Image: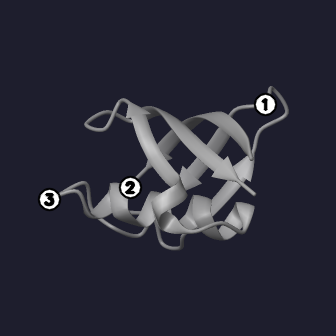
Amino acid sequence: MAVLTLQVKVKPNARSSSLLQAPDGTWQAKLKAPPVDGKANEELIALVAKQFGCRKSAVSIKVGASGRNKWVRVETE
């Protein structure tokens, strides 16, 4: 099992959801969900899990759960 740590900059309330890697190695996440009641964090976890082909339970937000800059931990098979 490999563990990845991603630096993600989040933009909530976007028109569409996407997760793209920037040239500097960080990730940009555009989320449809508003940053209310953890909805944006739930959508981010689902997007990251889909991108890396793992379960949602293998993705967690380690730092920055309430901010726009987050560190996300991903456990891949």
Q: Return the residue at label 2.
A: 12
Residue wearing tag 3: 37
Residue 5: percent from the left, percent from the top?
63, 33
Which residue is at the front of the view, 49 or 36? Answer: 49
Q: Around disc 2, counting alpha carbons within 10 Å, would you say few (fewer than 14), some (14 to 19), or many (20 or more)?
A: many
Q: How far apart are marks 1 and 2 (CA)?
A: 20 Å
From the viewer's perspective, is residue 21 above or below residue 50? above
Q: Answer with the quarter of the image where residue 42 lies.
A: bottom left
Mark 2 or 3, nearer chain start: 2
In this orientation, does residue 31 appear? Answer: no
The answer to whether the residue labelled 1 contacts the one labelled 2, judged by CB atoms less than 8 Å apart, is no
Task: Between residue 27 and residue 12, name the one nearer to us.
Answer: 27
* Dot in front, 1 or 2: 1
Q: Any mark on residue 25, and which? A: 1
As drawn, 42 above or below 20:
below
**In this view, which residue lies farthest toward the front?**
1
Q: Where, quadrant-wise, is the C terminus in this rendering?
A: bottom right
Closest to the observer: 64 or 9?
Answer: 64
How many labels sit on residues? 3
